[in-house]
Amino acid sequence: MYDGETVRAPYLDLAGWVSDMPPDLLDLKRAEADALFRRIGITFAVYGEGGDPERLIPFDIFPRVFTAHEWRRLERGVKQRAQALNAFLRDVYGRAEIVRAGRIPAERIFQNAAYEPAVVGIQPPRGIYSHIVGVDIVRTGPTDFFVLEDNCRTPSGVSYMLENREIMMRMFPDLFQRNRVEPVDDYPNQLRRTLMSVAPESCKGGPTVVLLTPGSLNSAYYEHSFLADQMGVELVEGQDLFVDGDHVYMRTTMGPKRVDVIYRRIDDDFLDPLCFRPDSMLGVPGLLNVYRAGNVAIASAPGAGVADDKAIYTYVPEMIRFYLGEEPVLANVPTWQCGNPDDLAYVLGNLSDLVVKEVHGSGGYGMLVGPAATREEVEAYARRIRANPSEFIAQPTLSLSTTPTYVESGLAPRHVDLRPYCLVGERIHLCAGGLTRVALREGSLVVNSSQGGGVKDTWVLAD
């Protein structure tokens, strides 16, 4: 919010707004926001602490703001990565030219747990593997943005982005009258258009789209039902679908209905018990045969996870150069791969200064933030790395930007990151906003909701 002692231009109105707000009204508005989230039912899961894992998502009423100029750069960078990642997926499930050219070692891809040999040679509709790309971005200076990781499978959190905006507009309509904030409420319509645009060529008439969920016990079930409702499509579980011949159908009260596009929110392993895990009760037996025949689109495609694996992340700038012939707009965070002996030696010698992550980890679990860890925790993590070095990467501890956040003691700086959502179909669309996650504990760099972080509304100011 501040550049030294001066309030930055995009925050001028908000600075006046917060200074004029009486403390009693502020407390009232915070309680109102909590009540709205509770009534709507927006929760997130915190595991490993005992008790009920379902918690109310902490929501901060002070928004994060980007200028139109800042956003245009982020938009170019995110769309560029989405294009390159999809080109990479088409390639590695085809001729693997990037491996032949020596740009990425073959073992990084073909020995990766997220690589799916079952889909080699299958060309998805329009050649698109990752239809919803969530890119996690941090800011370290006025013009310095870095990509922490890419999410090419089923990036979550978009329901928070939409509900954050809905609640802010309901509580503070005057703020939106005084500020030209780009809307985010068209995201469900854009998502539906994207999914319809990748319907298989065999589809006759308007495509039937469904959202496939693991069920109500899944921690993201609220988001699944929310998005299905907002898009106006059926929310289905595996038992609601069946395969007959070369097509997949949905059971309805009017009889079977052919399904053309499945927006799946379950992992690859559970999609089809005849192809992947035979004990899966969540998927649809024979679904991969229909996919292989080109009669259903699956978003995102099976096997897309190899593109967002943390061991592959380090090669994304090279993908951009190889497939697009461009220099990356957004930089990666410098990364050491512990599977390389030289990198391993450096990481083990500097563990207390680094952030170390599991290659296949997510949600903030299983990571070490060296500067915040005890000596015992660092030593225990070093033993884990030595036992299986290739399963870990390490990065420097970045000086993440902060935004004003309401905590028990009042307004205070807290570290944030950003996840914008990029839709890839007939065209590439980036929603003008995203999910800003905030580390609520003082000094913490871990923003994941699953680790106790909160969320904010994200504003992109129009020109």
Image: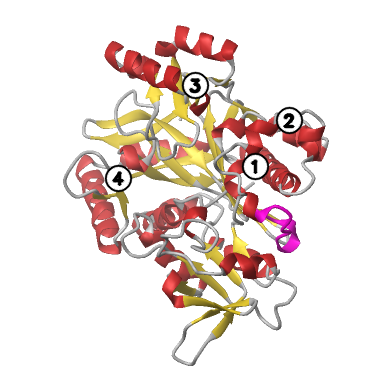
Q: For the residues carrying marks 3 and 1, which lies nearer the camera in this image?
A: 3
Q: Is residue 244 magenta?
A: no
Give amino acid for label 4.
Pro
Circle 4 sits on which residue? 58
3D distance between C-alphas at marks 4 and 2: 38 Å
3D distance between C-alphas at marks 3 and 4: 36 Å
Circle 1 sits on which residue? 78
Q: Reply above or below: 162 against 258.
A: above
Q: Reply above or below: 332 against 34.
A: above
Q: Which residues are magenta?
A: 119-130
Q: Residue at x 74, y 57 (%)?
A: 127
Give amino acid for label 1.
Val
**Residue 414 appears at what percent x and percent y?**
37, 30
- Horizontal arrangement in the rendering, residue 448 relative to residue 74 (left or right): left
**Residue 329 appears at what percent x and percent y?**
70, 33
Q: Are marks 1 and 4 in contact (CB under 8 Å)?
A: no
Q: For the residues carrying marks 3 and 4, which lies nearer the camera in this image?
A: 3
